Amino acid sequence: MTRRRPTIALLIDNMAGDYQSEVRSGIERAAEAHDVNLLIAFAFGEQIPLPGSTDAARRSLYHIIGSEIVDGIIVASSTLCHLASIDAVREFCRSSSLPLCSIGMAIDDIPSLMVDNALGTEISVLHLVDEHGCRRIAYISGPANNEEALLRAGGYRRALAARSIAHDERLFVSGAFTVGSGRAAIRELLDRGVDFDAIVAANDCMALGAIDLLKERGIDVPGDVLVCGFDDIRTARFTKPSLSTVRQPTKEIAGLAVETVLQMIEGEPVPVLRLVGVELTRRVSCGCGRQAGPLLLPPGAAAWSGPSSLAGQRASLERALAQAVTISARSLDGWADTLLSALEEELAGDRGRFLRGLEELLDAARREGVLLEQFQSVISLLRARLQRAAEQGGDAALNETLEQIWHASRIAIGGASVHVEGEQRLKVELAAIDVNYGMRHFSTCLSLPVLRSTLAADLPKLQFSRVAVSLFDDAACSTMRLFFWMEDGREVEVPPVSFPAHHLAPPGFLSGEERWSVITFPIAFGGVEKFGLAVVDGQPNEMIYDALRLQLGSAVKVATLHREVVRQVELRERIEQEKVREESRVAARIQTTLVPEQISVEGLELCAMMKPAAEVGGDYYDVIATPDGGWIGIGDVAGHGLAAGLIMLMIQSMVSVMASSPAAAGPRGIVCAVNRAVYKNVRDRMKRDEHATLLLMRYTRDGRVTFAGAHEDILVCSPRTRRCATIPTSGVFIGVLPEIDAMTRDAELVLEDGDVLVLYSDGVTEARNEHHEQFGLDRLCATVEASQSAPVEVIRDRILGAVEGWCPCLDDDITILVARYRKPG
């Protein structure tokens, strides 16, 4: 892959956090200044396994970034040690074939940039000993697997030794660089019952936690105990009391890291280890508060004799001013000279020139991220020097003019500081609003297509314009397929191609004529399940990235789970459908097998048919001839499938046996006996709740019909009237109650010569058309009446034809029995 400009990668644990934010900001500024592409990779919670570990090279984002994408790598080693061992980070850096620079941790044979950690802790301890007289100084160390923590602990011991103070192990406790661990450390110290007059912590978070717990125990800071931290995070200056701390020039180190890697890319030699100095920022927690100007003067500096002799004192004063403010940005080189020139012009008669120059300096310093409140020390220093000069010269008017300048300057510095802090607070609040509202739809994405639409709608609201989200295409996580692509805030059609995972993004995304700066992070859930990678353009507030990482991982996980649930449901439905189909086939065979092949009863012209539906129910009919007539039965088991077929089989068997007996009881007796057996079998043995209709009719040759049970109405069509009469069946469903004897009785009807008797199941009358209208009893009667004189087979077929014409797709079994009575002789 041909690139017109170098590309540098920054590997860091997270985008949030004061230290990480300053590292990122410094490297972004340096990359822009040197016109190089920048790729920032963070994988919060992702371990860096030792070489030889299973799947190490393909499972870690840090491992897949190679020469196909970048020309050099900057590793924020001290941040990666939070979750990985020092040995793992060292081996990872040594295994890279690319030019590589380490920040925050020294690695043999690898160019490394570090603040002088040991010196930072040492000057804190010496400050407490020499200027505040402390002798019992407790120390809260960082994690044992962090090299910076080890170096800072060494500085603590070295400072004690330098002042011949015995090291008391009871004053040494360990923490984890968190506020909570600082509180726990002080709790442990207090529980030990050891006396201490000061505390030095290996970072500011633990120092703030220590102050918090001391307040809870009624111990005043700095009244009873002095406290110093390390790092000078943003919060340190706003706490009460404000925190004295060691400030490290993080942005300067970041800029040096970019220069180091570029020199290595060009083949130039670079130092293996470079230590960058630190400074003690004294605030209230160590008992100093804001230092006055004279304290910042170098020893032996001469007093300024007056404005007229500024030229003779210029170099000394410039050095004193430079020591008062920590500025790592090279764009501000010479600021002290410029400010002094503005002061000269002010005293020469250009009213307001110094204030304008100061405001220009504050504006430039704000853009570089310099702590503006430091310039209060500049005003204190100038005021002290010029006040002595004015007093020595007896120039009261000059002194009054200068006091007005200093007063206006302090107001300007205070206003600028408040503006910067308000601006940062506003950015955080706006970012929080973006996170809350811009990502509120992610949790409702139950499928990947919905997630894609959500990304297209919400990412522009979060100020992203270029995004590539890719998902792994294979189990080995070696290839990916693009899932979502956005350019200039608009979704781009996703090309259907796969590409190697170590390319991070599809072809064309990490290329082009213009310089680019992007952030990449894994799409994962719980730090274990890895779904793919996201590459996004830069966005001002770092909290957005971690929120987007969590939301994307959770959304893909939810979509994956939902897809699996749907797949399992579909699979179960297919299995269940196949089971139902198989049961229906069995039930259909039961029904059709038990249907009598030939039906013949003396005095009756008989025909019948049963047509099973797609989901076979439990329709039943039977005709049993006897010497003096015969038995006719019809019924319907509620439900479908095999269970209904089995219950129908029970009913058919019992009716057949009892009706065929010479000593057969009447219809009522058989129906009640069948009910007792069905109830016991279905409820007690099968543990089911099906029931059935059953109508049993005893016909004799003289046309008398005795019947009992509950089923559809009996139809009798007379040749005299050519109209159908409906005879209700008033019994009880069988299988509902254990005994129905008291509610079942025999009823009787008498057939006349030529009468047509029609029995049917509810599949006839309840058949529905496309408007959900039932076929109904009236249409059935009309069909029978229209064909009353036709042969019984014709009547049966016309009924079936009318029903099928009404409802082309039958939902229930259809049973029809037609009989015409012929009187003997």
Image (cartoon, rainbow, N blue to C red):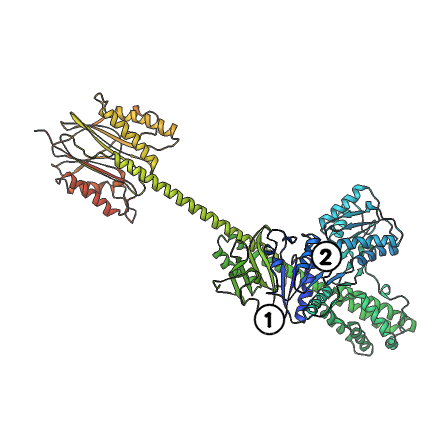
Can see residue 241? no
The answer to which quarter of the image holds residue 691 is top left
Residue extending furthest toward the bottom:
349
* Residue 175 in picture, x, y percent from top left: 74, 49
- Distance, label 2 to label 1, CA atoms, is 42 Å
Q: Quadrant of the N terminus?
A: bottom right
User: Which label number is shown at residue 288?
Assistant: none
The total number of labels drawn is 2
Badge 1 density bin: few <14, some 14–19, many ≥20, Cα 10 Å? some
Q: Residue 609, how many percent across, how many down?
A: 22, 38
Q: Which quadrant is home to the C terminus?
A: top left
Picture quadrant where residue 344 is located? bottom right
Q: Residues within 10 Å of mark 2 (few under 14, many from 20)?
A: few
The amino acid type, in three-letter code, at marker 2 is Thr
Dot 2 lies on which element? helix
- In the image, residue 191 sits, relative to residue 675, either above or below, namely below
Mark yes or no: residue 188 visible.
yes
Of mark 2 and mark 1, the one earlier in the sequence is: 1
Give the residue type that dot 1 points to.
Arg
Contact, mark 2 vs mark 1 (Cβ under 8 Å): no
463 sits left or right of 450 in the view: right
Vertical relation: 50 (above or below) 39: above
Q: Quadrant of residue 43?
A: bottom right
Give the left or right position of residue 455, taking residue 647 as reference: right
Which residue is at the front of the view, 74 or 380? 74
Question: 682 or 325: nearer the eye?
Answer: 682
Q: Could you say whether the residue bearing mark 1 is in a helix, strand or loop?
A: loop
Q: Position of residue 244 (x, y in %)?
A: 79, 57
- Find disc 1 in the rendering and name its residue: 3
**Which label sits in the foreground, 2 or 1?**
1
Q: For mark 2, what is the residue? A: 235
Front residue of 593/440: it is 593
